[in-house]
């Protein structure tokens, strides 16, 4: 390019046809073509098209090959034709048949130099813009200010991909607009500047507008014949080649809008249109100039692509799922049938039937694997049995109070007030019980030896109480001292045993009361080991509880059944005060008498029922219908003997359960029952009018779920304690596990 009216490199040979359109200027515009303002407008804005006859060429960026081609001689240059169908070409050269047209255009340009002097001088007051700078601005406009050129580093400038087509369009417009601008310049100055600076390049500084240089006088140079100079070869600006895959890694590809077809030019020439000069300002949008002629449609501005740093996500909400029938209809391209009550019912049946079947299968499996409930034995025989013969008639005394019972069977009855009363020597039964409980004697043992202390020896000579003639320092076994306690009823021996066992009499009394509480003797109180104190009281029923407990010791039963004994260290034979022992079947237990208590007797007798001894226990308290104390004691013995004899007569046995009789069944917990039978005859001990209870138990073993006929699964019993009788029970038939139907239908 050249400054000051020089020739622009790459001038098209068709510029002769554009000379007439270049003469259209705005009044007061200084001879400058208003279309040069397009060079300063952003490529994205609509571009004013001059005349339909203008030839638009796509400018390609200059490359090193193009520079070498320009510097080469004209004969060596390779001319490449330009076609309208290829918007991007390597170069634009003059066809061979257009030489005459070029000469005519140059001649017209020289002839119009004088006419444009006046217009150029009037334009000095306006903002100047050199054509060379404008042309280079067209070439460099795709690049941002202070950025590297596109042809040097196209890969580092992502904006080149967007601005290259726009720069090419602007360059095409510049090729046509430059013709009209050249017409207003002097040919001599253009030729001189073209020779001095054939390939000068400069950037257009849009921010710093230089002042217009004075136009040289055309009269100073002779008009030269138009010659096609090498500098007239216009190099097309080639858009930078962008590696699309590489650019796609930085920014997503932006879809390019399809160009709208350019309307066909009208045959008539476009009327004159006013224009306003706008200085070239890169990247500064300008107001579009109203045009009278048809304007080519500009590409629609494309919004900037979204940033790659922003997380990509789907903003469209998912559609709700379709009903099954609608989904099936959509897949099969068959419209769903019209809803009817019958179809709705059938659809619900088809949906819910598999679910119900699945639940039933799960329920059946769970019911089958569940553990079976525990089997139990239930009694079917009569739970009670009453002996024949009416009511039992016992000869109860008319004074005092008492009670009797058959051990393990039941009570024969009671009489009297059943209130606490003084016990006298009967209290020694509790003393013997505590000593044997704390120091038991088994078999033929006699227990530890106990030394007689001074207090026991001193009390041996007491006048108003029963004692044993022991001396200080003597030693006796535990069994011997219990014999002296129960047979002669020695008070001094009772206190000696208390001190030996608990350390003191008071401590031993506490142990006596604690033992009474353990036995359930709630109405008994002990204040001394011998019973001499009137404050030692109890009731007949409490004494029967004590009798049943102490008679469990073999050594005690042996001692209380002795009518007399001989002890070393004590002269003579010691006689038992309980004369009732001489009667058949009587075996103890203890007598007691005092003024407050009267005559008392705690007794034990035996009777044989079905070849087995049955123990009968009783007590008579408060016999006072006599003048002297020993007679009162004898009176209590006489009352007791009558009761013993009547009980021995009336106590009998009866068959309650026969052998092989069904007494109950096994319940498997699911409704199944298997009968059980008694393996032997069961007889109960009782008396006329007595009611006994039957009990069917498992015998301490779990009831099985399966078994064979005859397997023992429990026992049936009558009575408690020593009077309890029982018989084993066995399966009448095979015991089988519950079936699947029972397991399935159980709810518990």
Image (cartoon, helix red, strand yellow):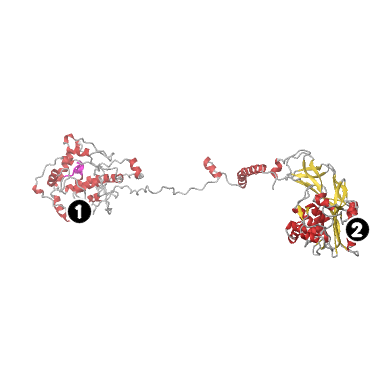
Q: Which residues are magenta?
A: 7-17
Q: Is residue 421 shown in magenta?
A: no
Per the image, label 1 sits on a secondary structure element best described as: loop
Residue 525: x and y, percent?
A: 78, 62
- Residue that mark 1 sits on: 209
Residue 229: x and y, percent?
A: 15, 40
Of the two numbered discs 1 and 2 in the rendering, the one whose residue sits closer to the viewer: 2
Choose between 144 and 73: the one closer to the eye. 144
Residue 304: x and y, percent?
A: 34, 49
Choose between 242 and 195: the one closer to the eye. 242
Residue 660: x and y, percent?
A: 83, 41
231 on left or right of 325:
left
Relative height, residue 530 to residue 172 (above, below): below
Q: Report the disc number at residue 638.
A: 2
Q: Report the disc number at residue 139.
A: none
CA neighbours of label 1 inside 10 A, class few (<14), some (14 to 19), many (20+): some
Q: Quadrant of residue 574?
A: bottom right
What is the CA distance from the residue labelled 1 to the residue labelled 2?
158 Å
């Amino acid at each position: 390019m050249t400054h000051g009216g020089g020739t622009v490199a790459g001038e098209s040979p068709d510029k002769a046809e554009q000379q007439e359109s270049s003469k259209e200027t705005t009044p007061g515009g200084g001879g400058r073509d208003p279309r040069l303002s397009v060079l300063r407008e952003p490529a994205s804005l609509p571009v004013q098209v001059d005349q339909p006859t203008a030839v638009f060429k796509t400018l390609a960026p200059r490359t090193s090959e193009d520079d070498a081609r320009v510097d080469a001689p004209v004969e060596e240059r390779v001319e490449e034709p330009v076609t309208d169908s290829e918007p991007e070409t390597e170069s634009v050269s003059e066809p061979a048949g257009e030489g005459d047209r070029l000469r005519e255009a140059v001649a017209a340009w020289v002839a119009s130099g004088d006419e444009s002097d006046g217009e150029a001088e009037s334009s000095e007051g306006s903002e100047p813009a050199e054509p060379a700078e404008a042309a280079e601005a067209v070439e460099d406009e795709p690049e941002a200010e202070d950025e590297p050129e596109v042809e040097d580093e196209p890969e580092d400038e992502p904006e080149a991909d967007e601005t290259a087509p726009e720069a090419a369009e602007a360059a095409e417009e510049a090729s046509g607009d430059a013709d009209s601008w050249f017409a207003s310049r002097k040919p001599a100055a253009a030729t001189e500047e073209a020779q001095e600076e054939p390939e000068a390049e400069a950037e257009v500084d849009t921010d710093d507008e230089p002042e217009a240089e004075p136009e040289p006088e055309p009269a100073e140079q002779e008009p030269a014949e138009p010659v096609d100079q090498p500098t007239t070869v216009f190099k097309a600006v080639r858009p930078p080649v962008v590696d699309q895959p590489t650019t796609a890694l930085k920014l997503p590809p932006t879809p390019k809008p399809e160009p709208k077809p350019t309307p066909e030019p009208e045959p008539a020439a476009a009327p004159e249109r006013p224009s306003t000069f706008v200085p070239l300002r890169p990247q500064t949008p300008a107001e579009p100039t109203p045009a009278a002629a048809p304007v080519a449609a500009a590409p629609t501005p494309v919004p900037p692509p979204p940033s790659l740093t922003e997380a990509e996500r789907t903003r469209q909400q998912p559609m709700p799922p379709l009903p099954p029938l609608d989904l099936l209809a959509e897949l099969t391209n068959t419209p769903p049938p019209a809803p009817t009550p019958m179809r709705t019912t059938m659809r619900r049946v088809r949906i819910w039937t598999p679910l119900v079947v699945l639940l039933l299968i799960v329920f059946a499996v769970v019911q089958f694997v569940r553990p079976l409930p525990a089997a139990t034995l239930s009694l079917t025989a009569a739970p009670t049995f009453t002996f024949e013969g009416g009511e039992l008639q016992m000869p109860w005394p008319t004074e005092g109070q008492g009670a009797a019972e058959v051990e393990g069977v039941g009570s024969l009855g009671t009489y009297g007030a059943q209130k606490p009363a003084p016990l006298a020597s009967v209290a020694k039964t509790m003393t013997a019980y505590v000593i044997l409980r704390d120091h038991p004697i088994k078999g033929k043992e006699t227990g530890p030896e106990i030394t007689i202390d001074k207090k026991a020896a001193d009390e041996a000579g007491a006048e108003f109480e029963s004692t044993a003639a022991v001396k200080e320092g003597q030693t006796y076994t535990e069994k011997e001292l219990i014999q002296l306690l129960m047979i002669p009823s020695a008070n001094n021996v009772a206190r000696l045993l208390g001190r030996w066992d608990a350390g003191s009499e008071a401590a031993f009394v506490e142990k006596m009361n604690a033992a009474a509480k353990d036995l359930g003797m709630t109405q008994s109180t002990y204040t001394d080991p011998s019973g001499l104190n009137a404050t030692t009281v109890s009731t007949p029923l409490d004494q029967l509880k004590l009798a049943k407990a102490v008679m469990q010791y073999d050594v005690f039963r042996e001692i209380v059944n002795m009518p007399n004994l001989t002890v070393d260290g004590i002269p003579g034979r010691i006689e038992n005060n309980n004369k009732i022992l001489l009667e058949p079947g009587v075996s103890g237990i203890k007598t007691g008498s005092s003024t407050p208590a009267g005559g008392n007797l705690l007794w034990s007798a035996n009777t044989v029922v079905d070849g087995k001894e049955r123990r009968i226990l009783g007590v008579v308290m408060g016999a006072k219908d006599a003048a002297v104390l020993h007679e009162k004691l004898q009176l209590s013995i006489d009352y007791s003997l009558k009761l013993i004899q009547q009980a021995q007569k009336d106590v009998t046995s009866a068959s309650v359960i026969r052998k092989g009789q069904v007494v109950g069944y096994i319940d498997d917990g699911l409704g199944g029952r298997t009968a059980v039978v008694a393996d032997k005859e069961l007889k109960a001990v009782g008396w006329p009018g007595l009611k006994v209870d039957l009990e069917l138990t498992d015998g301490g073993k779990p009831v099985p779920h399966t078994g064979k006929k005859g397997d023992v699964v429990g026992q049936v019993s009558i009575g408690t304690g020593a009077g309890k009788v029982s018989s084993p029970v066995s399966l009448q038939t095979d015991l089988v596990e519950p079936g699947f139907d029972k397991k399935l239908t159980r709810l518990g």
